[in-house]
């Protein structure tokens, strides 16, 4: 028994043993930081300078967004097809950013029906969806300005069909969410389903923290 205790005492006083123990502990602690982090998504295009109008009636555009990462989408308030799903998905993304303490990423939703979606209409829509204007901006403007930004800038579709009496207004537009970086460059187009939202959540942070 005495020899066994002596053997353990020798082990416990051996600096090499403690070095191995400390090394294993450090590897366990550092392993999460050593995981491979994907590179930020590539630059796909550059947005032009633009100024539109918010749901609060304030001028807002590329100057106000300079230095910020944002996720953009396209919608119109009287849309009965994809738009409610887009706004719901964006709400889920915004909630996740807040829940997980992610700061520095803004949401911007651009109306493709500016003749109808005036400031009061956007204000009412924002209230209905409980949108916080400090984090999420709805934008309207003139039809030419919106079309130039959506089609030429974001390189997405915007096509209004001829109105038919008694039928809902039909405006074809993209259902993608777009990540834009601090310099106004497009960094990716993503679906608004669960998998797409998860990718946006992580990829937008890769853009936010890239060096």
Image (cartoon, rainbow, N blue to C red):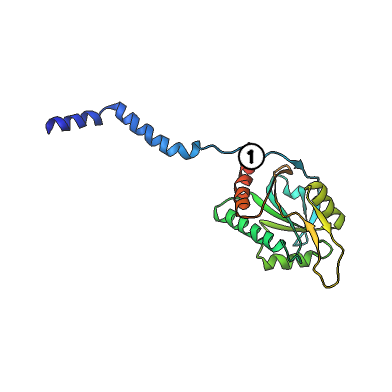
User: In the image, 64: left or right of 31?
Assistant: right
Residue 26: x, y in percent? Answer: 40, 35
Q: Is residue 151 above or below residue 166?
A: above
Q: Which of 129 and 199 is in front in this view?
A: 199
Q: In which quarter of the image is residue 18?
A: top left
User: In the image, 105: left or right of 158?
Assistant: left
Q: Which residue is drawn at 73% across and 64% down?
A: 81
Q: Which residue is drawn at 76% across and 62% down?
A: 76
Q: Quadrant of residue 144?
A: bottom right
Q: Which of 44 and 94 is in front in this view?
A: 44
User: In the image, 164: left or right of 202?
Assistant: right
Farthest residue toward the left? Answer: 1
Task: Indicate the secondary structure of the residue bearing disc 1.
Answer: loop
Residue 165 seen in the figure: yes
Residue 41: x, y in percent? Answer: 66, 40
Q: Residue at x 59, y 58 (%)?
A: 95
Residue wearing tag 1: 40
Q: Nearer the viewer, residue 114 or 137?
A: 114
The quarter of the rendered structure image containing the N terminus is top left
Q: How many labels does the image show?
A: 1
């Amino acid at each position: 028994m005495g020899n066994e205790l002596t053997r353990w005492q020798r082990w416990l006083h051996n600096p090499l043993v403690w070095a191995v123990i400390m090394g294993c502990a450090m590897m366990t602690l550092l392993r999460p930081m050593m995981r491979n982090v994907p590179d930020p998504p590539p630059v796909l295009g550059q947005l032009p300078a633009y100024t539109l109008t918010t749901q609060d009636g304030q001028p807002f555009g590329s100057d106000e967004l300079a230095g910020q990462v944002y996720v953009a989408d396209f919608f119109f308030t009287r849309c009965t097809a994809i738009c409610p799903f887009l706004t719901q998905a964006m709400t889920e993304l915004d909630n996740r950013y807040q829940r997980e303490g992610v700061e520095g990423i803004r949401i911007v939703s651009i109306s493709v029906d500016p003749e109808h979606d005036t400031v009061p209409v956007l204000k009412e829509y924002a209230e209905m969806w409980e949108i916080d204007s400090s984090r999420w901006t709805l934008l309207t403007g003139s039809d030419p300005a919106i079309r130039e930004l959506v089609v030429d800038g974001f390189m997405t579709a915007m096509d209004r069909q001829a109105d038919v009496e008694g039928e809902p207004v039909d405006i074809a537009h993209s259902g993608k969410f777009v990540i834009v970086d601090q310099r106004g460059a497009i960094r990716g187009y993503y679906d608004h389903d669960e998998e797409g939202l998860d990718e946006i959540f992580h990829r937008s942070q890769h853009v936010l923290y890239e060096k």
